[in-house]
Image (cartoon, helix red, strand yellow):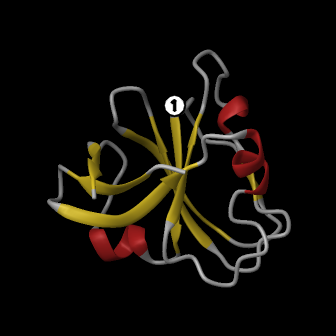
């Protein structure tokens, strides 16, 4: 899996390292059954899926996550602080779903409307 860093250009803050789930198995497994989430995960959503096609579940998750829903222009369109076994559909369709360690949204001051960037590590 490709690894990048998520940077909030609006706030000048680094959200952390992420891996791109770029295979069927990596998308299927996601972060399930992990006790520690130091490196986040990015799910790239095919265009045209709509808001329900951008939704995620927290089945078999062992830890809570901060999740950002980002459009094709790299703007945050929704965000959520999710606990294991929750299901969440964003208020707007997303091109990227970024799953991060709990607390990253508050730590960086990330807000809806912020512009993000994937940087090489």
Residue behind mark 1: 95
Residue at the outermost top position: 48
Quadrant, the C terminus: bottom left
**Relative to residue 30, is residue 22 depicted above or below?**
above
Mark 1 Cα-neighbour bin, 10 Å: few <14, some 14–19, many ≥20: many
Residue 2 image offset from top left, x and y in percent: 47, 49
Asked whether 34 or 107 is in front, the reply is: 34
Residue at (28, 69) in percent of width and height: 108
Residue 91 image offset from top left, x and y in percent: 58, 38
Residue at the outermost left position: 12
Q: Quadrant of residue 51?
A: top right
In this picture, residue 99 sits left or right of residue 83: left
Asked whether 93 or 20 is in front, the reply is: 20
Q: Secondary structure at mark 1?
A: loop
Residue at the outermost front position: 1
Q: Is residue 35 visible?
A: yes
**Relative to residue 110, is residue 53 depicted above or below?**
above
Q: Quadrant of residue 12?
A: bottom left
In this picture, residue 108 sits left or right of residue 26: left
Residue 11 image offset from top left, x and y in percent: 17, 58
Residue at (69, 84) in percent of width and height: 35
Q: Quadrant of residue 80?
A: bottom right
**Relative to residue 31, is residue 120 depicted above or below?**
above
Residue at (60, 47) in percent of width and height: 21
**Relative to residue 45, is residue 89 depicted above or below?**
below
Residue 58 image offset from top left, x and y in percent: 77, 62
Q: Is residue 88 visible?
A: no
Residue at (77, 47) in percent of width and height: 25
Residue at the outermost bottom position: 35
In this picture, residue 106 sits left or right of residue 63: left
């Amino acid at each position: 899996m490709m690894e990048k860093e998520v940077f909030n250009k609006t706030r000048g803050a680094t959200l952390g390292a992420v891996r791109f789930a770029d295979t069927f198995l990596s998308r299927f497994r996601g972060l399930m059954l992990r006790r520690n989430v130091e490196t986040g995960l990015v799910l790239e959503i095919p265009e045209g899926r709509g808001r329900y096609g951008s939704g995620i579940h927290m089945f078999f998750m062992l830890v809570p996550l901060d999740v950002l829903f980002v459009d094709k222009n790299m703007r945050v369109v929704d965000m959520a602080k999710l606990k294991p076994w929750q299901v969440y559909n964003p208020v707007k369709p997303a091109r990227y779903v970024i799953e991060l360690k709990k607390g990253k949204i508050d730590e960086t001051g990330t807000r809806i409307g912020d512009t993000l960037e994937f940087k090489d590590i």
